[in-house]
Image (cartoon, rainbow, N blue to C red):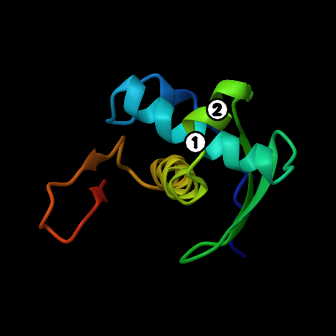
């Protein structure tokens, strides 16, 4: 019988501190966008996630507190959702792989980011 995976507890802490390959400012921008979107959609903190793909499992994600400055910073909600999705994807991918971070790709390579 396969061993059940312990529910991962995720946060943006390493992304914001620059430990996942992006600068603290870059990672912080992504994390802020995700937190703002989660706040706008009235999600709890931490929020429950249903991760699916090659592996499927539940996880929880603790996100950052939000203030008025976030509404001004992330007024373009499409862009906020895109950067926020990147933040969540980064913390999940690093949790599930042997990779310790990501890097942004050069335009024209066909990739946006890589592990």
In the foreground, 48 or 1: 48
Decide: is 33 above or below 105: above
Q: Position of residue 105 (x, y in %)?
A: 20, 54
Q: Quadrant of the N terminus?
A: bottom right
Relative to 53, 94 lies left or right:
left
Decide: is 55 above or below 89: below
Q: Residue at x 70, y 36 (%)?
A: 63
Q: Position of residue 61 (x, y in %)?
A: 71, 44
Do the CB atoms of the residues marked 1 and 2 lie less than 8 Å apart?
yes
Classify mark 1: residues with Cα within 10 Å, few (<14), some (14-19) or many (20+): some
Q: Residue at x 87, y 49 (%)?
A: 42
Relative to 47, 78 lies left or right:
left
Which residue lies under the disc numbered 2? 70
Could you say which disc has been placed on residue 29 in the image?
Answer: none
Which residue lies under the disc numbered 1? 74
Q: Position of residue 64 (x, y in %)?
A: 69, 30
Relative to 53, 44 lies left or right:
right
Q: Position of residue 109 (x, y in %)?
A: 13, 67
Q: Is residue 19 visible from the viewing direction of this image?
A: no
Q: Residue at x 50, y 55 (%)?
A: 79
Classify mark 1: helix, strand or loop. Answer: loop
Relative to 9, 32 lies left or right:
left
CA gap between label 1 and label 2 equals 6 Å
Decide: is 72 above or below 87: above
Classify mark 2: residues with Cα within 10 Å, few (<14), some (14-19) or many (20+): some
Query: Residue 72 lies in what quarter of the image?
Result: top right
């Amino acid at each position: 019988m396969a061993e059940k995976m312990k529910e991962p507890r995720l946060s943006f802490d390493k992304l914001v501190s620059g430990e996942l390959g992006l600068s603290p400012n870059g990672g912080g921008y992504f994390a802020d966008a995700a937190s703002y979107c989660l706040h706008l959609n009235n999600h709890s903190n931490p929020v429950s996630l249903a991760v699916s793909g090659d592996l499927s499992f539940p996880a929880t994600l603790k996100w950052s507190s939000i203030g008025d400055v976030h509404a001004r910073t992330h007024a373009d909600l499409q862009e906020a959702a895109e950067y926020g999705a990147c933040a969540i994807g980064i913390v999940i991918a690093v949790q599930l792989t042997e990779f310790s971070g990501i890097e942004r790709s050069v335009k024209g390579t066909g990739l946006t980011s890589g592990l």
